[in-house]
Image (cartoon, helix red, strand yellow):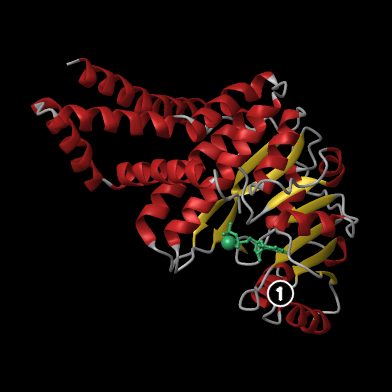
Amino acid sequence: DPLIIAAIALAFTHFSIPITYYWYLRTRWLNSLWNIVVDPSHTPMISVIVPTYNEAGFIEGKLDNIYDQEYPRDRIEVVVVDSASTDGTPERVLEWSNRHPDIALKLVREPVRRGKAHALNEALKHVSGEIVIITDADSRLLGRDSLKKVAAYLSDPSVGAVSCVKIPEASGPEGIEASYRGFYNVLRVAESNLHSTPVFHGELAAFRRNLLEEVGGFPTDIGSDDSHTATLIALKGYRAIIARDLVCEEAIPRKGYHMWRVRRAQHLVQHFWKILRARHKVPKRFKTVLYTETYLHLFNPWILLAAAILLAASAATGSLLAILLLALGLALLLFKPYRAWIATQLYLIAAAVRNLWTRE
Ligand code: GDP
Ligand code: MN
């Protein structure tokens, strides 16, 4: 049956490419030496930007988390950029700042909400640090030496941007999120060892300020502002890395988990499309990573869908083999990593479709 042969070929393609890529990165790059020279005594001025929109429940804990960093306090400047929060977030920021006069804090207020990237660009006008760190209000840096490490990695002139690996907050909807993170953190770190990773995390995204300016700040037309900016920096030949010893905790929403995953996926799809369409010249060492990740985010999910449709069509005509293969595909859902993978494919497909009518 040609339908079944085609379906098997598609399914094979869908699974073999990411497995080969993962295996290659894991064996060849995950534990290979960083080609990076770190100077732990490097303590440049760091501007930490926290974008907020209705974060009253998180903002004080967030500022405490930054305050607890073991980094010379007179080398840190915190900038909270708030976009017309209605829950008293800016008032809490000012109160917190009054209680902590020994750390410089600036509150930038936007009169109307025009998105995170817009707010970040506004904040950039007010910062003076050599390094700019963006960190989401609902996340936490897990090491007190995070800023120190960021500064150390960026002491190497070949490094342009640094981000963290992330672990889901302990109380979040366990399982699926955890396996997703384990697999993806391996990719992120190994890609970084090879050259750069095209996916950054809003929990901690650090940039050289002069490079941020060179790439024009954060893109306001797509959602993955941190990943996109990091990738533009990598395309300039600098390294955009995720360091395995920089760990952040990400807040998992209790409500609307699936929609949150779809929105995340939408942002990544927008990011990779924008990179693809701009037809950049890609530095040699970054090619494998960028091309494979673009393929995995934009095209690979659809190959799985096509395989499933072919099998279903064949099953509908009574093919026993097709029914068996479909059943096998479903039975494998009992295994967590497979389930997490399939879920991610579905989020990417839903994301591409939803991008057709809303980009938020
Ligand atoms: P998610 O984790 O990707 O779902 O995104 P969040 O909703 O947690 O937003 C990430 C960070 O950006 C949080 O600190 C938000 O408060 C902040 N944020 C989101 N939208 C805006 C905005 O329009 N303006 C500002 N200033 N911050 C925003
Ligand atoms: Mn968040």
Nearest to the observer: residue 148 or residue 58: 58
- Residue 237 position by quadrant: top right
Quadrant placement of the C terminus:
bottom right
Counting every numbered tag in the picture gives 1
> In the image, is 333 to the left or to the right of 158?
left
Residue 38 appearing in the image: yes
Please name the residue shown 39% across and 63% down the image: 173
Q: In which of the image's four quarters is ligand 2 placed? A: bottom right
Please name the residue shown 54% across and 60% down the image: 250
Quadrant placement of the N terminus:
top left
Nearest to the observer: residue 360 or residue 216: 360
Please name the residue shown 48% across and 51% down the image: 262
Q: Is residue 313 above or below residue 253?
A: above
Q: Is residue 129 above or below residue 137?
A: above
Mark 1 sits near ligand 1, with its Cβ under 8 Å away: no
Residue type at mark 1 is Ser
> In the image, is 255 to the left or to the right of 359?
left
> In the image, is 234 to the left or to the right of 165?
right
Residue 301 position within the rendered picture, expressed as x and y whole percent measured from the top left: 41, 34
Q: Which residue is mark 1?
A: 85
Residue 70 appearing in the image: no
> In the image, is 171 to the left or to the right of 147?
left
Residue 292 position within the rendered picture, expressed as x and y whole percent measured from the top left: 53, 26
Nearest to the observer: residue 222 or residue 45: 222
Q: Residue furthest top?
A: 2
Q: Is residue 311 above or below residue 258?
A: above
| Callout 1 crowding tier (Cα within 10 Å): few <14, some 14–19, many ≥20 | some
Q: What is the secondary structure assignment of the residue under circle 1?
A: loop
Residue 185 position within the rendered picture, expressed as x and y whole percent measured from the top left: 51, 44
Please name the residue shown 89% across and 56% down the image: 125
